[in-house]
Amino acid sequence: MLERTLVLIKPDGVAKGLIGEIISRFERRGFNICAMKLIKISRDKAELHYEEHRSKQFFARLVEFIISGPLVAMVIEGPGAIKNVRHMMGPTDPAEALPGTIRGDYALNISRNIVHGSDSLESANREIANFFKSDEIIE
């Protein structure tokens, strides 16, 4: 099934110069990039992005990190994009990520794990709307 998902290259990935490498992995796999921008997000947008974690003790750290520098936001489209993109990223904890995954190759700890990918169709729709207006997404 053709799906869209939100992918963020987080501030640590941008700072390490991994934008091109990460994008090329998705393109080589056959995914289409429907929208992309380099941005520094506001605290409000970050809090909305991590809304489901608001009651957890690590919420403030998540927000502080994601607003600490520029990030790349992308809408990626393809068959089974949500599951396949997350598989390419590897587990959230890089210590559990296999070599060959983005986190397995480039991330050192769970709080700075290079990338974000939507975890469900519901999350993807909400997250894409948080980062992109409909006229910014190429059909």
Image (cartoon, grey):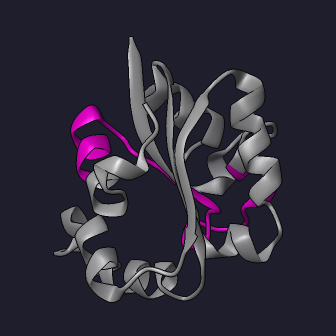
Residue interval drawn in magenta: 103-126
The image shows residue 55 at horizontal and vertical percentages of 16, 75
Whether residue 50 is visible: no
Of all residues, the one furthest to the left in this rendering is 55
Q: Quadrant of the C terminus?
A: top left
Left or right position of 88 against 134: right
Residue 132: percent from left, percent from top: 36, 57
Provide residue 57's location: percent of width, then percent of height.
28, 81
Residue 125 forms part of the magenta stretch: yes
- Residue at the image point whose x is 78% and y is 27% from the top: 28
Q: Is residue 47 above or below residue 123?
A: below
Q: Please state which of residues 36 and 30 is positioned toward the viewer in this rendering.
A: 36
Looking at the image, how many numbered discs can be counted on the residues? 0
Residue at horizontal 23 percent and vertical 71 percent from the top: 48
Determine whether 44 is above or below 98 in the image.
below
Residue drawn where x is 36% and y is 41% of the image: 119
